Image (spheres, helix red, strand yellow):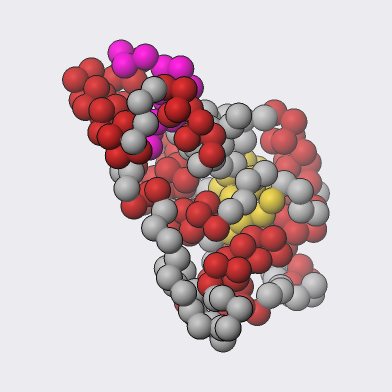
Amino acid sequence: MPILLGVPAEFSSILAAGCVTNSLLKVVNIVEPLHILIADDHQLVRKGVRALLQSHAGWEICGEARTGRETVAMAIELRPDIVILDISMPDLNGVDAARRIRTASKNTEILILSVHYSDQLIREIIDAGARGYVLKSDSDRDLLIAVETIARHKPYFTSQAREVIQSESTNSSGPVRKIPQSFRDRITSREREVIQLLSEGKRNKEISSLLNISIKTVETHRSNIMRKLEIHSISDLVRYAVRNQIIEP
């Protein structure tokens, strides 16, 4: 079994196995109600996910969030068992929101539900503490199985996400190869917040207020970001943010 560099052993074994048995939904028996927080900036998506999950006995939707910061605040207040979280959230992206939730509420599991997938993004969410990843193009059953699995504190990745990780884990001859350094290793969490807010059109004064830092500190972050990424304009920064799923196009 190949070892996936940078991926915890529990994820490696699940991904290498390549599947979760179809009987899982029948086997799992959660006695206590499962409290779920849904976080997506699109109301239609939230309604659809709510309708699907509420059809399952013993699952309760404890809240809905529209932005990354609102998600973190509600997760800290409500302490849900699972947060179903989109990646491209306003104000605070899903990766950073997941990291904050896991820090503040270690028993809360994170399931990413997104239209985006790439080797970099998958590794970002694993590093942030998320235990599951489902694409919005996957079936309803995939989402139900994912919730059941994560409720047992086990990782779950659907086929496309597994294929991305497996394709990066080995070359055609089989030996493990090193995963390229991701942008997270160069950009700090705070800098990524500033990237998102700048890309969303926020001015330095607004960012200062939102992040509770001085305008001078915002300017320093902005300068460091431009230097690290070797870009020279806000339009270049927006393109970078879109490419790396920090904001939606």
Along the viewing direction, whichever of 104 and 193 lies nearer the viewer: 193
Asked if residue 211 is positioned above or below residue 168 in the image, the reply reads above
Q: Position of residue 111 (x, y in %)?
A: 58, 53
Where is residue 41, by image quadrant? top right
Q: Which residues are magenta?
A: 191-205
Give left or right: position of 60 versus 95.
Answer: right
* Residue at screen point 46% across, 17% down: 201
Q: Residue 199: say if magenta.
A: yes
* Residue at screen point 54% across, 34% down: 242
Asked if residue 122 is positioned above or below residue 90 in the image, the reply reads below
* Residue at screen point 62% across, 35% down: 40
Where is residue 215, by image quadrant? top left
* Residue at screen point 30% across, 13% down: 205
Q: Position of residue 63 (x, y in %)?
A: 60, 37
Asked if residue 235 is positioned above or below residue 186 in the image, the reply reads above
Give left or right: position of 46 versus 124.
Answer: right
Along the viewing direction, whichever of 116 and 229 lies nearer the viewer: 229
Q: Position of residue 165 (x, y in %)?
A: 57, 66
Q: Position of residue 194 (x, y in %)?
A: 36, 29
Identity of the residue furthest to the bottom in this view: 1
Dominant secondary structure (helix, strand or loop) of the stretch shown in magenta? helix
Asked if residue 93 is positioned above or below residue 186 in the image, the reply reads above
